[in-house]
Every structure is written in C-alpha cells, then in structure tokens.
Image: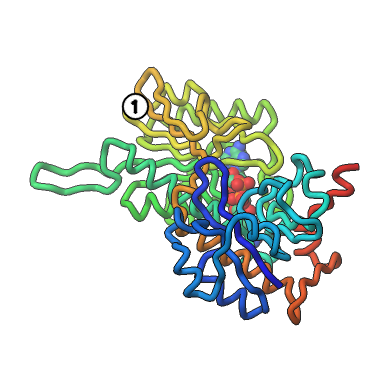
Amino acid sequence: LLIGCPAETEWHESRVAVTPEVVGRLRRIGLDVVVEAGAGRRAGFPDEAYVAAGARVGDRLEVFTQPDILAVIHRPDCQRLRAGQIVIGLLGPYEAPEELSEVTALSFEGLPRTLSRAQSMDVLTSQANVAGYKAAVLAADTFGGFFPMMMTAAGTVRPAKVLVLGGGVAGLQAIGTARRLGALVTGYDVRAAARADIASTGAAVLDLKVTAEGEGGYARTLTADEQAEQQKALVDAIRDFDVVITTAQVPGHRPPALVPAEALAALAPGSVVVDLASGPLGGNVAGSVPGSRTETENGVVVLGAGNLPAQVPRAASSAWARNVAALLEHLIHDGSVVLDPEDEVTAGLLVRTKEAVS
Ligand code: NAD
C-alpha cells in the first residue's frame, strides 16, 4: 500500500499532514510513503528529512495519482483524485459532497471525540490546542505592557489581567499559556464541567450567571434572553481586563456573539482582544475580521484569528501527523485497510457521499 502526502495549496496554509517523524510508524504497518517535493518545507521539514526517514519524494502528479491513500489537511482539488482512493483530512464533508463521491473520504470532522480510543486521532483537539497557545502568545506580543509582574529598580509593574471566554480545548490552552507568561488569568464558560476545568488550572472563574449545557459534552446555543443577559454581565465585568481571548463555539452553529460593541467600549485604550472563533460565519467579538487586526475608536486592538495553527506549523503538523498515524494503525490490519462500518471510529469518519448527494 502507498500513502501520499501532497503540498497544501490553501492560502496561508503552511502545515503538512505527514512529517518525517511518523514515516517509520507508517512503514511498520506496511505503508510506503511518497511526499510531494517541498510539502513540508514551510513547516520546517525538508525533503531530505523525509528521505532519511524512509519516504520517497515525488512530483505533484505522482503524489496524486499513484497512492492508495492520501493524507491531507484540507480538501484537495478533487479533480486530481483517482477513483477508489482513500482520502483522509478535514474535508468539509457538507460542502459539495458530490466532489468526493468517487473516493473513500474519511473526514476528521466526524470522529467520535468522546471515545477514548479516538483521542489519539483527534485533529480538532490537537489543532485547537495549538490555536489556544498561539492566541495567548499573539495577545502578549500585541499588548503594550508586560504579562508578568515585574519588580525593577524603577518600581513594580502589575501583571496583565487576562480574561478567556470559552474553556474548551483552545480556551484551556490559552489560559495555561497566559498563566505561564505570568498574567493573572480569569476564565468563563457556559458549561459547568468547563468551569471546573478552568478552576483546575488555577485561574479564577468568572460568573456571568448563564449556564447552557448541550449534548455530547458541548454547549448549546443561548436563547436571545440568555445572550442579552450574558452580554450585559460581560459589559460590567470586562472593564477590569487588559486582554480578552474568546474561544466560544457551538458545533454546527455560528459562533456565539459574546463581546458586543458596548463591552469593547468599556475596555481601556491599549487593551487587546483576540477572537479565536472569528471566521467566515462571524465570531465572538463585534466587528472582528478573520485574519485581520482592527482598532476601535477607543483604541482597543481586535485580532480576528484566521488560521492560527498554520502560524505554528511545525508543532501543528507534528500533532496532525501523529493523529493520522494513530488512525492508520487503527484501520490497517495485515497490510490491508479494513473499513468496518460497525466500528464507531470508522462509521464516524466515513463521508457517506451517496446519501449526502441524494
Ligand atoms: P468548542 O470548540 O466547540 O467550544 C469551545 C468552548 O466554548 C466550549 O467549552 C463551550 O462550552 C464554550 N461555549 C460555547 N458557547 C459559549 C457561550 N455562549 N459562552 C461561553 N462559552 C461558550 O469545544 P471543544 O473545545 O472542541 O470541546 C468542548 C469540550 O468537549 C471540551 O471541553 C472537551 O473537554 C470536550 N472534549 C472531549 C473530548 C474527549 O472526551 N475525548 C474530546 C474533545 C473535546
């Protein structure tokens, strides 16, 4: 069996789905590996490192046409795919599913995340972790003050006060990173379990009075009244903070509107807000633009996140490639790919294009 890894072509994407580190793991389960020339370069993995690990480097045409399995980050140009190939990645299965109808598409969006044996394969978690880290580092880099308390001959500087809204995977990593940089951190989430996770990091927990447990360990969308109550409580609480990082998401819905313009107006000039949820469907923060820095009239800098994992491409690719290797170790038995529809992992990942198209 041959697995191929093409270079990603999405705008600002610098990650790669297979790294030299996992080539040995893939070979041990009977896979030969071919990587497109230059595919890992922007993530810090030169072609020579793949060759040294036992992979072959090929051109784009052979990397698309020869392999039985393709490992990608985003959905590739589907016209290049060969009928019958297995394609593994974040394939966005609900958009134009007919493009995937000739291949066996395994899309990480469908992984059953609460299943403990699926955790080592979970790219949503591994990449949210990278995004949370980067959000805190970006905030520290943009903020005009220090994160830690500084005691110097010229006097003492108080630590920055950081508020993290949303205590899922990304939020908890943003909290941990801001704390390691020395900030005084407070967190908030609508789920009680997430508030307990925030408290366990040693951060303070903000009480915005609104609780909204959904299904499968996720939050539910707030009612209009709850959202208004949450926003009002936030306008009162937010003025104490120098930095706000928002990470709130409800799967399958627009990101919740958490920080209205009145809350931004309550922040001091020079405060920094990072909206990790900012994307094509909107974000958590009024007026945030994905991938852009904007400034409010009162001098608050708002950073819309865009693709943060791609800004930490080495760590993000390493984690992704390990997730892919763990999945293939689960699927490959005696040199063959076994797609058992009774297996929860396989059933979750398999994109049922025929049903989706009809
Ligand atoms: P996510 O990216 O969907 O959401 C991020 C956070 O935003 C969640 O904690 C959610 O409660 C919060 N949120 C949503 N609406 C909000 C609002 N209006 N105000 C404030 N916060 C709001 O979630 P995620 O980080 O991918 O995962 C969510 C949880 O699922 C995690 O805490 C994690 O523990 C759990 N999870 C479990 C497993 C597992 O058991 N293996 C794997 C992945 C995730």
Secondary element at tag 1? loop
x then y, percent, for residue 85 = 76, 60
- Residue closer to the observer: 336 or 307: 336
Look at the picture and state if 300 lies above or below 138: above
Look at the picture and state if 292 lies above or below 161: above
Q: Which kind of residue does numbered mark 1 sit on? A: Ala
Instruction: Tell me if the residue at label 1 has its CB under 8 Å from ligand 1.
Output: no
Q: Mark 1 points at which residue?
A: 268
Left or right position of 107 against 140:
right
The chosen color scheme is rainbow
Look at the picture and state if 346 lies above or below 278: below
Q: Which residue is drawn at 38% across and 43% down?
A: 138
The answer to whether residue 304 shows anywhere in this view is yes
x then y, percent, for residue 208 = 54, 36
- Badge 1: residue crowd in 10 Å (few <14, some 14–19, many ≥20): some
The answer to whether residue 169 shows anywhere in this view is no
Left or right position of 147 against 3:
left
Location of the N terminus by quadrant is bottom right
Q: Residue at x 59, y 76 (%)?
A: 25
- Residue closer to the observer: 60 or 95: 60
Q: Residue at x 60, y 60 (%)?
A: 5
- The quadrant where residue 223 appears: top right
x then y, percent, for residue 94 = 76, 42
- Residue closer to the observer: 53 or 223: 53
